[in-house]
Amino acid sequence: MTSDAVVTGERRANHDRRVERSRRTLELLLDTVFRPGHWASALAYASGLQGRLQVSSSTIDAGRAARGARPLRIAFASDFHAGATTDSRLLTDACEALAGLEPDVLLLGGDFVSVRASYIERLAPLIAEIPAPFGKFAVLGNHDLRANRAEVVAALERAGVSMIVNRSVMLDAPFADVAISGLDDPTRGDPRPDWTSRDDETTRIVLMHSPDGLHAIGDRPFDLAACGHTHGGQITLPNGRALVVPSGTLSRRFCRGIFRLSDAGRPRTLLVSRGVGCSTIPVRLYAAPEVHLCFII
């Protein structure tokens, strides 16, 4: 890496830290205003300004069908943002939808809370009710790391969720060929992938909070990487163009949707969710909340 690239990287990191500090101050102020009775999020939900939850489905060909393997049903959701800016009814809608998908595995992409870790108690009991016989797995987002991380993790673990930050787990049979790998948040954490090569018989699913996790992954192989963070812009123009995108060099390029990444070997697929809740302000516009069902075949 050249010295100019290092300087540019340091400047970007310093800029992101300043933005994070400013945003944290703003969110604390707004939380104080919105918190009493959670009036703002309740009003926004009732008037349709938090959007109506959508379920998006996709099929990822990981070569498992050719081996006679059973399809894997993955339910994925990110960015719940339990707190003063997300109405509790939207959290309930999302968790009921996830349960209705009858997943084999539940993946959760972080940002469970906004501002205060104590808000996790509005969400964790709902997650506990989602059946996922082969496991519930999660990583943390930048908002979780700005709050009391230990409190968020403890509540999720009581709900039956396994944290897989910078580690991989292999599923039980009949999905013993599937590895779920989690990454730390690239904005406030230290993402360190724990795999370097692939066995052609292993299906690799990566769970991360932000599209910027791709920087840490580099050219490592995977079949599906699922993330959120961008909220799909949260406030966008009718054509879906985001007016403001969260921190991260890849958040605008990969703002929402399914992306097929170029790869000399087996294709890699990136899923970027619009997420469930709202951060900073209790409004979504042309970026409806969503949860996902992925068939891995």
Image: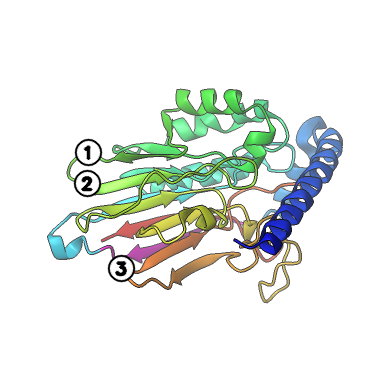
Residue identifier under label 2: 175
In 3D space, how far apart are the residues under numbered discs 1 and 2 (Cα atoms)?
Answer: 6 Å
Residue stretch in magenta: 52-62
Q: Residues within 10 Å of mark 2 (few under 14, many from 20)?
A: some
Task: Say which of marks 1 and 3 sits in front.
Answer: 3
The disc label shown at residue 266, or none: 3
User: Which mark sits nearer the N-terminus, 1 or 3?
Assistant: 1
Quadrant occupied by the N terminus: bottom right
Side of 176 relative to 223 (left or right): left
Say what amino acid the circle numbered 2 marks. Phe
In 3D space, how far apart are the residues under numbered discs 1 and 3 (Cα atoms)?
Answer: 24 Å
| Quadrant position of residue 137 | top left
Q: Give yes or no for residue 59 being in the magenta stretch.
A: yes
Say what amino acid the circle numbered 3 marks. Arg
In 3D space, how far apart are the residues under numbered discs 2 and 3 (Cα atoms)?
Answer: 20 Å
Q: Residue furthest left?
A: 68
User: Which mark sits nearer the N-terminus, 2 or 3?
Assistant: 2
State the residue in front, 250 or 124. Answer: 250
Residue identifier under label 1: 172
- Whether residue 34 appears in this view of the structure is yes
Residue 245 percent coordinates (x, y): 71, 60
Side of 161 relative to 191 (left or right): left
- Whether residue 281 appears in this view of the structure is no
